[in-house]
Image (cartoon, grey):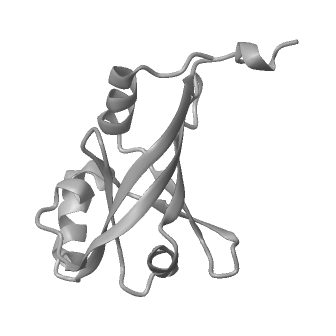
Amino acid sequence: MPSLSKAQLDEFLTDQPHIMKLATLTPEGWPYVNPLWYEYDGEVFHVAGRGKARWVAHIKNDPRVSVCIDTYDAPYTRVLMEARAEIVDDNWQVPSPDKAIRYLGDEAGRKYFEETGHIPRNLVRITPIKTTSWSGGGWHPRYQA
């Protein structure tokens, strides 16, 4: 299973509306995983969370996070990251329906934006530190005897 090149990684992270699984740490040190919509600019991710979301509170307490973005159908692709998260705006309002349209389609996305776009959110920047990826089938040579 080969790793993705930078170009393949960028394409994978931007071409489809994959769901990010974001793992934060509870105050007791337990992983807490939350599925999220995301935007990726080739260097960092941006996600938005409601003010009372547990995972947002976790980031305020400890910025270390892990990310998993993957596919559910063969040939499987997986991207895993160790990263740092930072709340860059704790009173952010969604500027357009673009992300909702990306994830829900045109009609449902616009409706979702109309109903919730005015509600302030926490805008969170996630900066990857270490990235591991693979795509395709079979076992990676390091796992073969």
Query: Relative to the observer, which residue lies in front, 35 or 61?
Result: 61
* Placement of the N terminus among the 4 image quadrants: top right
Name above or below for residue 130 compared with residue 111.
Answer: above
| Residue 45 percent across, percent down from the top left | 33, 52
Q: Does 77 sit above or below residue 138?
A: below
Q: Residue at x 25, y 59 (%)?
A: 100
Tell me where residue 25 appears, x and y as whole percent: 60, 70
Judge from the rendering whether residue 15 lies leftward or rightward of residue 62; answer left or right.
left
> Which of the two residues, 75 or 46, is positioned nearer the viewer here?
46
Write the residue at 28% across / 38% down: 42
Q: State whether residue 78 appears in this view.
A: no
Locate residue 139: give its quadrant: top right
Image position of 39 with respect to 79: above or below: below
Residue 141 placement: quadrant: top right
Q: Name the residue located 51 percent from the left edge and 81 percent from the top edge.
A: 54
Residue 20 relative to residue 33: left or right: left
Q: Going by the image, does 1 lie left or right of 93?
A: right
Q: Quadrant of the C terminus?
A: top right
Q: Is residue 61 visible?
A: yes
Is 128 situated above or below 65? above
Which quadrant of the structure image shows residue 24?
bottom right
x and y, in percent, of residue 57 in the image: 47, 82
Identify the residue shown where x is 47% and y is 53%.
83
Front-most of 21 and 143? 143
Percent from the top left, x then y, of residue 15? Answer: 31, 33
